[in-house]
Image (tube, rainbow, N blue to C red):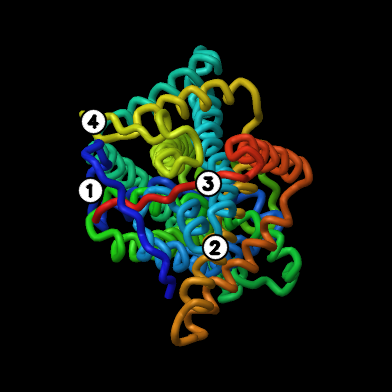
Amino acid sequence: MSSKPEVTPTGGAPRLRRALSLWDLVLYGIVLIQPTAPMPVFGVVYQEARGHAVTTILIGMVAMLFTAISYGRMARAYPSAGSAFTYVGRELHPSLGYLTGWSMAADYMLNPLICVIWSAKAAGNIVPEVPYALWAVFFALLFTGLNLRAIRATARTNEFLAAGMGVVIMLFLISAVRYVVHLGTLDAGFFIRPFYDPRTFSAKAVWTGTSIAVLTYIGFDGISTLSEEVHNPRRNILWATVLVCLITGILASIEVYAAQLVWPFGKPFPDVDTAYVHVAGQAGGVILFHLVNMTLLVATIGSGSGAQLAAARLLYGMGRDNAIPKSFFGAIEPKRNIPRNNVLLLGGLALAGAFVITYQFGAEMLNFGAFIAFMGVNAAAFVRYYLRAEKKSWINALPPVFGFLICFYIWTSLRTPAKVAGGIWVAAGLIYGYWKTHGFQKELVRFEMPPE
């Protein structure tokens, strides 16, 4: 175990308020990831994996569970709002923590941005008379307004969003069952092919599909950014992180399995990007087609507002630890106990970015920062719970090792433009750090731990 002292700040400055339960965290994580998470990527994964989309979802669940365990265990050691930034910085080296936080900042800031883009376009499909620009302004203001309220109000919003999405998913599953039943007598192979079809199976294709399907789970790490606002963080962060990954994986597998039964491999989609909506139309007609389309819009609203919430807490943790200007990013608004400056900044960036970058490029850049953080947390967990442990145990070593290796594989599979843009962002962070410390001659980061 690490013997590093934990620093607790003194003084009467406003702090984040502990108001969340384990159930609040699980709901927040589910809404942040989206109960409908596999639906937007279904068509692409289905094609790449040659009809084995459900298999890729299950493989992705195992992979992310390893990383979720590392996140949960590190949250036990460091119950701080900084998340991976704090874990890597305190366990490995402050400079590595700074670079992890800098990479995560791009990930977290891009998530609400791409949600604004997708929401604006989806809403335009419903009300085409309203131009994209107005929808972009509307959703950027909506996400920001939701996060300017107290944390308990945000938790209540999550409950309504999760319930609404759950109802629509149930309607789709019922329609899918009715559709399959009316197909007539089917052999056992029909129900097994979504997992394994000997006619089309290719290990390489399945792994390629898995590298995309893992996007289903992106966002679970946002739970750890609320460590300072949850009761008993050393227990609840670990349980919530693992439970959210497990629940997401099971639910996603059911959704994808049902879709594969309705739409057998080989039949082309009218549009790959919105393939799941067309599957819904096949199973339940025009009404279900539009209902699922609307549900995906609602899910994106929940994900966008949740991502902005997590990003604001990440920037707060970095600001409080002096990695970025503390007077702005580390400030807490005393009335609602929220990092208001960060929420407003992120809203402005999301609005501006909606007119500058595309959804696809934003999503690829998001993955660049996300997997740097995942690798960093797995490395920190390996060092703390295996290398520095008094008693070595393979149980403590295997999850972070497997998690790191899988994340590294996915990260190296990113397209070149995303790697170049991500490299530029990391280089900018190094330049800022060099300037801030006068050539790295001064302290780069001062990690502070909140009272429990």
Q: Quadrant of the N terminus?
A: bottom left
For the point 55% across and 58% down, the residue is 93
Instruction: Determine whether 24 is above or below 309 in the image.
Output: below
- Specify the amino acid type for callout 4: Pro
How far is disc 4 from disc 3 in space, using C-alphas?
Answer: 29 Å
Question: Label 1's element?
Answer: loop
Q: Position of residue 140 (x, y in %)?
A: 45, 24
Between 95 and 311, the residue placed more toward the observer is: 95
Q: Residue at x 50, y 36 (%)?
A: 324
Secondary-structure class at tag 2: loop
State which mark lies toward you, 4 or 3. Answer: 3
Q: Tell me the CA gap for discs 1 and 2.
A: 28 Å
Alpha-carbon span between mark 4 and mark 2: 33 Å
**Closer mark to the observer between disc 4 and disc 2:** 2
Residue 270 seen by the camera: no
Residue 334 numbered tag = 4
Q: Which residue is mark 3?
A: 443
Q: CA distance from mark 1 to mark 4?
A: 14 Å
Q: Nearer the viewer, mark 1 or mark 2?
A: 2
Could you tell me the amino acid type at mark 2? Leu
Point out the tag, 1 or 2, that comes first from the N-terminus.
1
Which residue is label 1 attached to?
Answer: 18
Residue 11 at x, y = what percent?
24, 41
Q: 326 and 170: which one is in front?
A: 326
In this image, 397 relative to 21: left or right? right
Sequence-wise, which precedes: disc 4 or disc 3?
4
Name which residue type carries label 3: Glu
Residue that appears at 52% across and 74% down? 399
Q: Earlier in the sequence, mark 2 or mark 3?
A: 2
| Mark 4 closeness class: few <14, some 14–19, many ≥20 residues within 10 Å | few
Q: Is residue 320 visible?
A: yes
Q: Which mark is residue 92?
A: 2
